[in-house]
Image (spheres, rainbow, N blue to C red):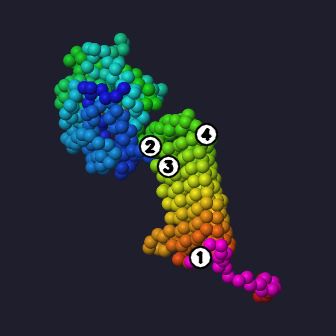
Amino acid sequence: MGIIENLSVAILSAGAGTRMKSQLPKVLHELAGIPMVHYVVREAQKISNDVNIIVGHRADEVKKSIENKFENINFIQQDLENFAGTGGALRDLNPKNKWVLIINGDTPLVKHDELIKFINSRDENINIILGVLSLENPKGYGRVVTSNDGKIIKIVEERDASEHEKNINLVNSGVYLILADLLKKYVYLLNNENSQREFYLTDIVALAKNDGIETSIYKLSEKIFKGVNNRVELSDAEEIILDRIREKIMLNGTTIHLPKTVYIEESVEFIGENEIESGVSIYGKSKIINSIIKSGSVIESSYIEKSSIGVIAHIRPDSKIVDSKVGNFVEVKKSKLTGVKAGHLSYLGDSEIDTDTNIGAGVITANYDGKNKYKTKIGKNVFVGSDSQLIAPVEIPDNVMIGAGSTIPSRTQIESGSLVISRGNVRIIKNFFYKFFTTK
Ligand code: UD1
Ligand code: MG
């Protein structure tokens, strides 16, 4: 498998996606952290050396998002004012190759090996193949009208369909393979005489039929080719992508409890044996090695090795946690913890904490003075008593004990072996309680 000679790809991504009810162009809505159209571009580049993307609505945003991630993409600007619609989208396409695979940018579940099967299904004398889905609920799709002998007559959009046609379960997936010359010819023959006043690409099928050119149909799987037009379909498609991610991780040695409740982005890497409890979310470029991530924890672009995280811990970007135990309600940000225990209710930000150090409940590294952020460094074998605040920048050397409830001012010089304690003296005023509450 690989690049198919003679194949160009056109990805339709110029529509506004009004059904998303969003400022963001539809194809930039994300599934598991990746914009919808990126999935399509990625698969297209696996099979073709000529990938064309049709942009129009908010073209610059769409282009920029794709250019940030992919090289060698050809962008084509659609004239949305005069030639709106999926047919209008292809007027200015100049494919380099003999065949064109057309696919919608709102089909993020697509897999290149399925596209290859689709392309290879072509019989020698066939010049157009249409990818179809057979759906229990065909709502929203263009219906494929066939004759008694199963030959395709036309595609009719739902808005233009008769009641009878609406009952057809065979629908257009939006994936076509067509001879480039034929596409060029028919795209100019389309009209916009339909309910949306748009140039429908789908009408090519009927035009070809009039010329005696047969379109063959190929059944595709809904789980791979379904389109996303609104946010319900977006979440349905995301669920399928998450299923794929979670399945791969589990097969590679990570146990996931209640997987449907666990959100993991594709960019997350798992090495060795791991365990993930319910309700966990892991984002970005995280790496999880031989660790357990307990219920309700959130990890963002961080490195976790031989550690236990949570329940309900928040590990924010650029943290590195090795041989450590981070417990409930602990927030760690841009910090390096090696061999550390931080069991409860802490904020550890911009800090570096070394082996055998214990962070008591409620300890806070005060890293921000309202203008700048500063670092906290805590050495080996330090005992930080509960409810202490370390005001950064500050450095605690090895073998130090900090008494519970202490506030350690920034730049405090501390020697190894010390006890550091800052606490108001205890005052006891006898009988105060009774006087206060009984006298009027
Ligand atoms: C389209 C098909 C429908 C099919 C369905 C499959 C047409 C007329 N209808 O309907 O038969 O069942 O896909 O998912 O083709 N786009 C442009 N320029 C435009 C309009 C749209 O590039 O002027 C792009 C959109 O960004 C989108 C894709 O084309 O990625 C499809 O457009 P959309 O509006 O989603 O069409 P559907 O109603 O889904
Ligand atoms: Mg669509």
**Disc nearest the viewer among 3 and 2:** 3
Question: Which residue lies under the disc numbered 3?
Answer: 286
Q: Which of marks 3 and 1 is nearer the N terminus?
A: 3
* Residue sitting nearer the eye, 66 or 413: 413
Q: Where is residue 399 in the image (x, y as percent from the top left)?
A: 64, 68
* Residue sitting nearer the eye, 194 or 318: 318
Q: Is mark 2 on a helix, strand or loop?
A: strand
Residue 414 marker? 1
Question: Which residue lies under the disc numbered 2?
Answer: 31
Say what amino acid the circle numbered 3 marks: Ser
**How far separated are the C-alphas under marks 3 and 1?**
35 Å
Q: Which of marks 4 and 2 is nearer the N terminus?
A: 2
Say what amino acid the circle numbered 1 marks: Ile
Q: Position of residue 330 (x, y in %)?
A: 60, 60
Mark 3 surroundings within 10 Å by alpha-carbon count, few (fewer than 14), some (14 through 19), many (20 or more): many
Say what amino acid the circle numbered 2 marks: Leu
In magenta, the rendered stretch is 413-434
For the question of whether residue 82 can be seen, the reply is yes
Q: Where is residue 418 in the image (x, y as percent from the top left)?
A: 65, 75
Q: Do the residues labelled 3 and 1 touch (CB within 8 Å)?
A: no
Q: Earlier in the sequence, mark 1 or mark 4?
A: 4
